[in-house]
Each structure stands twice: as C-alpha cells, then as structure tokens.
Image (cartoon, coloured by chain):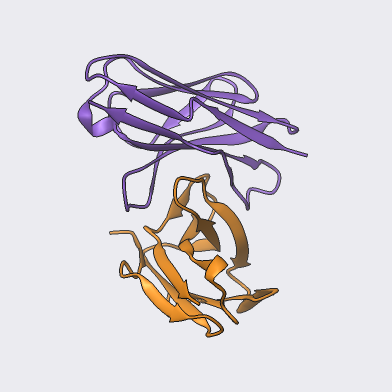
Amino acid sequence: SQKIEQNSEALNIQEGKTATLTCNYTNYSPAYLQWYRQDPGRGPVFLLLIRENEKEKRKERLKVTFDTTLKQSLFHITASQPADSATYLCALRDTGGFKTIFGAGTRLFVKA
Amino acid sequence: SQTIHQWPATLVQPVGSPLSLECTVEGTSNPNLYWYRQAAGRGLQLLFYSVGIGQISSEVPQNLSASRPQDRQFILSSKKLLLSDSGFYLCAWEQDRAKDTQYFGPGTRLTVL
C-alpha cells in the first residue's frame, strides 16, 4: 500500500541547534516532494520543493535532501529559533497526478 | 497578488443539519482547487479537487459533496452532517501551469454536536 510517514513524536531541541525532520514514503514515484509549515489553527504554508532529479535544496536556514533510492527526504533547520516551533508537513505529488499527498506532520518545539 | 478566502472561520452545527462552506480565490485564473479535512493531530485528508468549472473529483466516499460554480469559487456541502464530519476544513489552490505549490486558506473549524 502507499504510505507517507513522518515521525509522530514531537521533536524538542534547544535554540541554536539544528532540527532534522524525516519523511519516508513507499509505493510512490514522486515527481517532487514539498515541505510545509503549519501553525496551530492555521493553514499550511509552503516552504520548499525538491524535484526527483535534485539531491539537495536550500533556502536561508532551511535545507531539504531527497533520496529516491531510500525513498526519504530530510528537512533541516539550522540555528533554530523558538519562532520555528510549529508542525512541519511533508507532501509529495505522484508523477502525472493532480493530487498532493500529505504526511501527518512532525511537531517541532524549540526551547530558548 | 493572489489571495484565498474561506468562510465561515468557525461553525458549530447539530447532527443532521446541512452544511455549506465557501472558498474563493482572487488574483489568478483557472486554478486547480482542493478541499482537505484535518482531524485533530492528524494529517490532511484530500476530499475533493477540481481542475475547472463543474469538474469535481471525489477522493473519499462520504456524505459530503463539492461544487465549482465559478472559476474561482469552490463550495463544500452536506445535506446531513454526522459527528464524524467535525474537523478543520482547508481549501487550497495551485496554478495549473506550475502545479508545484499549493496555497491554503485560513480554514474553517467545524464542530458537529
């Protein structure tokens, strides 16, 4: 069956450290993978997209890697800040499809 | 610039009552439109998507329906709500040409009692 999985346990880290979130998928052939941020009671906000032929993408303090052999994406926030505390969702679009499939998200807490 | 609106922001409805949630997009044309539901602490469940006026694809068979009467208007409806319909309903749009980023509305918190 098709699955997209994120660590359901919350991630607690100290301010200034690097947060690393994991997204694994099975039985998909994604054209690309995305990461979104969601704050409580709000809609998700797009952060980064990485395509199947890309290994790494960066944007300011954010870095995403994509390993199609391992079927895994890692999302890194360097020099984390309390304002980075939120739920982070990974999502993928299957090749040729109209649907974006979302993971359940990982809650990140950054302590000052 | 593009904006997406949803209303109402919150709604409390009794079991068996009807539902109508509205979503409108401004500043773009011919967007792909999506309805998602998010249960507490859960991921986004795709309910419906539309690639054009009157074109609706349903992902989950249930007592909900969707309509797209105008290019930038997407409506989620139900004739009789169930307790299990409670959740956070999100509308999203994407530019058909690019198809690579979804932009979400502020959401509607629905509680069915």
Pick the front one: A23 or A85: A85
Quarter placement of the N terminus of chain A = bottom left
x then y, percent, for residue B42:
33, 52
> Residue A22 sits in which quadrant?
bottom left
Q: In the image, is residue A65 above or below residue B106?
A: below
x then y, percent, for residue B60:
32, 36
Horizontally, residue B84 falls left or right of residue A18, namely left
- Chain A is which colour? orange
> Residue B58 sits in which quadrant?
top left
- Residue B76 seen anywhere in this rendered image of the structure: yes
Horizontally, residue B14 falls left or right of residue B4, namely left
Pick the front one: B79 or A111: A111
Looking at the rendered structure, the number of numbered marks drawn on it comes to 0
Residue drawn at (50%, 55%), measured in percent from left and top? A38
Provide the letter of the chain coloured purple.
Answer: B
Q: In the image, is residue A48 above or below residue B25?
A: below
> Residue A4 sits in which quadrant?
bottom left
Q: In the image, is residue B54 above or below residue A2?
A: above
Horizontally, residue B22 falls left or right of residue B30, namely left
Residue drawn at (45%, 74%), measured in percent from left and top? A21
Query: Hey, which residue is sitting farthest right in the picture?
Result: B1
Pick the front one: A38 or A69: A38
